[in-house]
Image (cartoon, grey):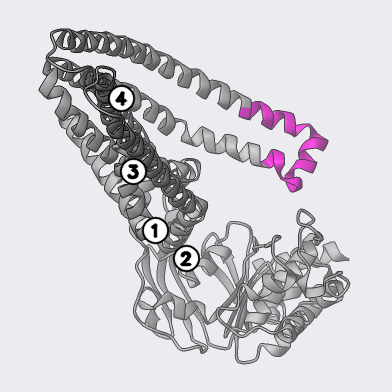
């Protein structure tokens, strides 16, 4: 009993959330849609009533009990009723289609806002990732869920109208229908639960199958897969998942269908018994022929409405199971807290004070008691082996991750107390896994990161020149208005090195007081790299520059080089100072230099 109560509570909360979502997104259209659905629920009953009157009037006409004028009125009433309900249906269809035309976009807009507010650290949580995956798979169910909820209201109104007639004329039959539907609803609960468990338990494998499927249709990974025969390997993985899932899915659905067939047989017997009772009352002249047609039609509408209400409740329950994860994204996971301290657009000291950090669900700390001071206007380079914590350090400066213990200060203020948007306006950053917006033009790829800054063709060209990208962009047919993917009409595909230069131009265009570059020239030739860093060191006066690189030629001109090893600062100083120490940095530098020689 406790379980059932909890299940109904979940359905209620999800229904409240979904209905509230639609009234928030489309207040006028949603109100119209609900009202029109209720009106349409009366169509069958009104038609049954008209037919009953028409039948009795036709019988009276054959016996001379009435004249043609009453028939004309009924015909006019029939035509008027048909036209009215047709118009209601047309308007309702228009309203619903208008809502659905934008629903996919609206739902993703809501999800995007929520995810942006959650913070990166929460998004790397496997449980939340699975829920987002299920949102993408089942978001279309939200519209179905709302339609079901609205239909239940409309069907209930129709059920009450016909129920009034049946409980007055054949109460035993009406009661039997209600009992059968109640039993059917409880039996459906078991199978809904089984489908939910199947969907939940296969989420991880479904994500893997989806990832394999994506690799099979994306040009970049597909070329390697075809050459290596890996496409067959991934296709087999997808097929294995699908076969396993469908075997379990069909087993549940088959058993459920047997139960549905049994219930339909009961429904048919009750309907037959109901017709028998109505015919007896007509034979005994308790009711007229017209009333007979009204009661038979009302019984069918009553049974259909009751069955449809039960079916809609089943769909509502089934979809509530699917939507429970979507609901939890918005109700269970709290937005990342923000500070209130506003920063001006300026250069600030950045200080790590006794910082400890471990990734969510991580086993060991990345940093232990880390102390680091970056003075405003200082140009520093961070070097170290893979896994030393370089990129993690950058992400913490950006407050994508927060210290497990200790503090990060920006201009003497705890970074957790800063209004993060005001800090982001001070940062221009290029991660090693930078974004490449292939569906946008060169210009749009740069101005997307402008944070409200005024953008002109001249400012775009200037930034491209600094990034050594202008030469190849000028050769494009459409220049800075060139789409950067051959998958769009008139588009072209830049090389990896060209993409990286466009990304660097994006950071230069932002012209922020703090410039952070994480492996900024990994895909760029040595000559272009030299030009880019000449600009960085020449024109970054007064800015704080933080560079992560494995190429010592790019870091040797930094004011200070920080050597990280296993989350600890093991050496720091200028290039010359570190060579004199003849430690970890010097050994790595000499080894790399020997490779170039």
**Earlier residue among tags 2 and 1:** 1
Cα distance between the residues tagged 3 and 1? 16 Å
Residue 107 location (% of width, % of height): 45, 53
Where is mark 4, residue-wise?
304
Decide if residue 530 is on the left or right side of residue 71: right
**Earlier residue among tags 3 and 1:** 1
Closer to us: mark 3 or mark 1?
Answer: 3
Where is mark 2, residue-wise?
400
Residue 295 location (% of width, % of height): 22, 21
Tell me if mark 1 has few (under 14), some (14-19) or many (20+) residues whose alpha carbon lies within 10 angstroms of its own: some
Cα distance between the residues tagged 3 and 4? 16 Å
Closer to us: mark 4 or mark 2?
Answer: 4
Where is mark 1, residue-wise?
26
Closer to us: mark 2 or mark 1?
Answer: 1
Tell me if mark 2 has few (under 14), some (14-19) or many (20+) residues whose alpha carbon lies within 10 angstroms of its own: some
Residue 82 location (% of width, % of height): 39, 38
Above or below — where is 530 with respect to 299? below
What's the mark number on residue 37? 3
Closer-to-camera residue (257/497): 257
Would you identify the image quadrant in which residue 550 lies?
Answer: bottom right
User: What span is colored magenta in the figure?
Assistant: 215-238
Closer to us: mark 1 or mark 4?
Answer: 4
Cα distance between the residues tagged 2 and 1? 34 Å
**Earlier residue among tags 1 and 4:** 1
């Amino acid at each position: 009993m406790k379980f059932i109560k909890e299940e109904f509570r979940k359905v209620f909360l999800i229904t409240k959330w979904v209905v509230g979502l639609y009234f928030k997104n489309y207040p006028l259209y949603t109100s119209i849609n609900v009202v029109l659905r209720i009106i349409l629920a009366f169509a069958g009953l009104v038609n049954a009533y008209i037919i009953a009157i028409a039948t009795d009037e036709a019988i009276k006409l054959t016996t001379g009990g009435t004249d043609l004028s009453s028939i004309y009125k009924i015909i006019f009433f029939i035509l008027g009723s048909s036209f009215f309900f047709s118009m209601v249906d047309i308007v309702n269809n228009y309203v619903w289609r208008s809502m659905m035309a934008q629903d996919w976009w609206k739902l993703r807009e809501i999800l995007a806002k929520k995810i942006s507010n959650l913070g990166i650290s929460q998004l790397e949580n496997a449980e939340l990732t699975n829920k987002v995956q299920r949102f993408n798979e089942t978001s279309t169910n939200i519209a179905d869920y709302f339609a079901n909820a609205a239909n239940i209201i409309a069907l209930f109104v129709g059920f009450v109208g016909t129920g009034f007639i049946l409980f007055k004329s054949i109460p035993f039959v009406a009661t039997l229908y209600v009992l059968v539907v109640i039993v059917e609803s409880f039996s459906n609960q078991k199978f809904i639960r089984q489908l939910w468990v199947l969907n939940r338990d296969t989420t991880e494998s479904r994500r893997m199958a989806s990832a394999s499927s994506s690799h099979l249709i994306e040009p970049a990974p597909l070329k390697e897969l075809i050459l290596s025969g890996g496409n067959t390997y991934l296709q087999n993985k997808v097929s294995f998942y699908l076969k396993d899932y469908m075997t379990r899915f069909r087993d549940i659905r088959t058993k459920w269908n047997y139960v549905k067939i049994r219930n339909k047989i009961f429904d048919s017997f009750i309907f037959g018994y109901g017709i028998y009772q109505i015919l007896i009352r007509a034979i005994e002249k308790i009711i007229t022929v017209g009333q007979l047609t009204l009661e038979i039609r009302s019984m069918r509408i009553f049974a259909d409405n009751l069955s449809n209400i039960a079916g809609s409740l089943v769909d509502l329950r089934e979809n509530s199971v699917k939507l429970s994860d979507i609901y939890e994204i918005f109700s269970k996971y709290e937005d990342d807290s923000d500070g209130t301290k506003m920063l001006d657009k300026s250069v600030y000291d950045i200080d790590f004070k006794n910082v400890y950090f471990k990734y969510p669900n991580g086993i060991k700390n990345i940093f232990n008691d880390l102390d680091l001071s970056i003075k405003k206007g200082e140009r520093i380079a961070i070097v170290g082996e893979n896994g030393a914590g370089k990129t993690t350090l950058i992400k913490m400066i950006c407050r994508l991750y927060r210290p497990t213990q200790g503090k990060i200060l920006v201009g003497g203020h705890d970074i957790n107390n800063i209004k993060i948007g005001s800090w982001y306006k001070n940062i221009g950053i290029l991660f090693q896994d930078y974004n490449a917006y292939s569906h946008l033009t060169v210009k749009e790829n740069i101005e997307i990161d402008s944070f409200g800054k005024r953008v002109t063709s001249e400012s775009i060209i200037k930034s491209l020149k600094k990034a050594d990208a202008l030469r190849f962009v000028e050769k494009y047919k459409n220049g800075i208005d060139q789409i950067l993917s051959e998958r769009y009409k008139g588009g072209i595909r830049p090389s990896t090195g060209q993409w990286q230069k466009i990304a660097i131009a994006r950071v230069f265009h932002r012209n922020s007081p703090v410039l952070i570059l994480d492996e900024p020239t990994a895909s760029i030739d040595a000559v272009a790299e030299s030009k880019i860093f000449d600009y960085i060191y020449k024109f970054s006066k007064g800015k704080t520059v933080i560079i992560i690189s494995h190429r010592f030629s790019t870091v040797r001109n930094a004011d200070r080089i920080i050597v990280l090893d296993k989350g600890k600062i093991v050496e720091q100083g200028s290039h010359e100072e570190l060579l004199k120490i003849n430690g970890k940095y010097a050994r790595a530098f000499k080894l790399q230099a020997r490779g170039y020689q």
